[in-house]
Each structure stands twice: as structure tokens, then as C-alpha cells.
Amino acid sequence: MWGCVRGSDLKGAALAALFAALGAATSAWAEEPARVVSMNLCTDQLALALADPDQIVSLSHFAIDPTMSVSWKQAEDYPLNYGRAEEISILHPDLVLADTWSNPDTIRMLRTLGISVEQLPPGTSLPEIRARIATTGELLGHPDRAAKMLADFDARLAAIEKPEPGLRAAIIGPSGYGYGPRTLEGQILEMAGFSNVVSGPGLDWGGRLPLEDLVMDRPDLVVVGGSMKGQGTSRAQEVLAHPVLRDLPVVRGLRDASWTCGAPAMLTAVAELAALGRQIEKDKMTQ
């Protein structure tokens, strides 16, 4: 069985290392960079929101995919890159924004060529998301815009009406993978007022969730599917159509581009989940 009690999802040392890395990144920039390249979907979104339009010389090719990017329409105005060192270097950027998961060979080659690359850790917890926004603002020379974004983020989050504590939910993807509390999906669940069924020792980042266990756990909500490109019919997808799910309160088609990055757009997903939670509460009262 999958326990309902969430363990500690933030280790003090790990979080301290994150802030140290981000602090080192911001200290490298004393003035606003004039030519910025983003090679990651989530840095695309923050660059579009925080930079001057003429600062950006290229975004990742994911930026114009509406299934993945909330800023796809805005991104259509910019040249795209596929994360290759040769195409980025000829743009002569003075700042490249990347993720810690970006291609290490590309990062190494760009730095060998003397190009400044800042790798931002992916934000999944609220402290990490806030740090990523603040750091990106500093790197782009617009800390005031980042501060406003954070203030707006906090105000929007506070305005979301959550269900009362006690509702339990799970998010499952291809192959029956359940998203744990340290994932962005798990953070969205928590922010919406749900406790995560996929939690407990060794499950911070999730793991394969046997459907039999899910049925026995009887969560109040099961969010099925995902938003990533290419999720068509496959053996990995078959589990999401298993007949046993008919006996559970399943919602499909909820996960869209707002679930992709730890950024203000995720609050759309939080608000949608919270609204579902409130409806579940009302339904229980009428039963």
C-alpha cells in the first residue's frame, strides 16, 4: 500500500546548495546583458516575461509548441534553437540561460568558446521556484520585474480558494507512474489543498503505482495523463485506459502547458485543481 503521510521533501543542505549556486550566478552580472539566448523551455518562459524584447536573440524550439509552452504565441516572434553549440555560438550571446539538465556537451563547448552560460536548477518546490524567478531577474538586469512577478504570484496563490484539508489525490502518467511530492506535479497538488497518495519513504520523486494499490487506497481524485508532446497510443499509455480506473474518480485532459514549469502559469493548474476539490466537497455533502 501507498502511505498517505508525506515525508520531508526539502533537505536543508540541498536547499542551501541551491541558493548558493543561484547567488553565485547573480553575482556574475553587474549590468544588463544585451544578447540573451535561452535553450530550455522553462527559461524561455521567464526570459519572455522578464527581459526586454530586444534582449532576446533566440529561444528553444519548444517555446512555440502550444502543448508545452504557455508563451508559444509570444515566442513566435523570435529565432529558435535546438540546443546545439554551433547554432548558439554564431549568435554571439553574452548570456545563455540553460537548465541543470541541459546537454552537458553543449554547455562545455559554449564555455570553452568564452560564452557565459548560467544553468538554473529546475524549480519544483515553492522556495526553488521563487529563487529561480528572482535569479533570472537578476541575470537579465531586471530584478524589479522579478520582484513584481513574485508579489503577483503570492497574491494570486493567496486568492485561490482551497478545499478543506483531508482530500487525497494522485497524479499518474504513462506506465502507471505516480508523481511524488518533490515533483512539480506533487507541488501543484499540495498548493491546491490535496494530500498526495504517492508519498512515503523512497517516493519523494514518485515511482510506478500499481493500479491495484490505487483502487485499494480510494483517493478522492485521480488525475490521469499528461501534456508532453508525442503522448499518443502506446503500451505505456495503455495503463491509463485500464478498466479498473472506471471505479475511481478520474479526471482526464486537465494537464496542459500550465503544468510544465515552476513559474506563475502553474497557478492556473493550482486553481483548476482547487476548484475540483471544492466540487468534490460539495458532492460529498449531498451524498
Image (tube, rainbow, N blue to C red):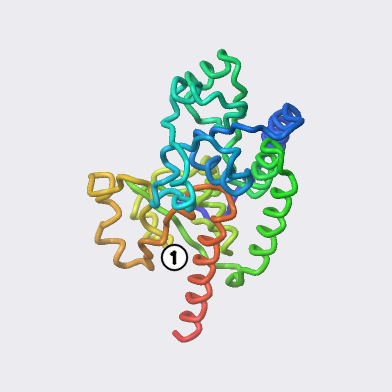
Q: Residue 173, how many percent across, how many down?
A: 37, 50
**Residue placed farthest to the top in the image?**
112
Q: Is residue 11 left or right of residue 111?
A: right
- Relative to residue 166, is residue 282 depicted above or below? below
- Relative to residue 272, is residue 257 depicted above or below? above
Q: Residue at x 65, y 45 (%)?
A: 133
Q: Which residue is mark 1?
A: 221
Q: Quadrant of residue 17?
A: top right
Quick one: quadrant of the C terminus? bottom left
Q: Nearer the viewer, residue 85 or 123?
A: 85
Q: Is residue 69 left or right of residue 225?
A: right
Q: Residue at x 62, y 26 (%)?
A: 94
| Amino acid type indicated by mark 1 | Leu
Q: Residue 153, how many percent across, how many down?
A: 66, 58
Q: Residue 55, how many percent across, how many down?
A: 60, 38
Q: Residue 79, how many percent across, how many down?
A: 45, 37
Q: Nearer the viewer, residue 111 or 31?
A: 31
- Relative to residue 5, is residue 234 depicted above or below? above
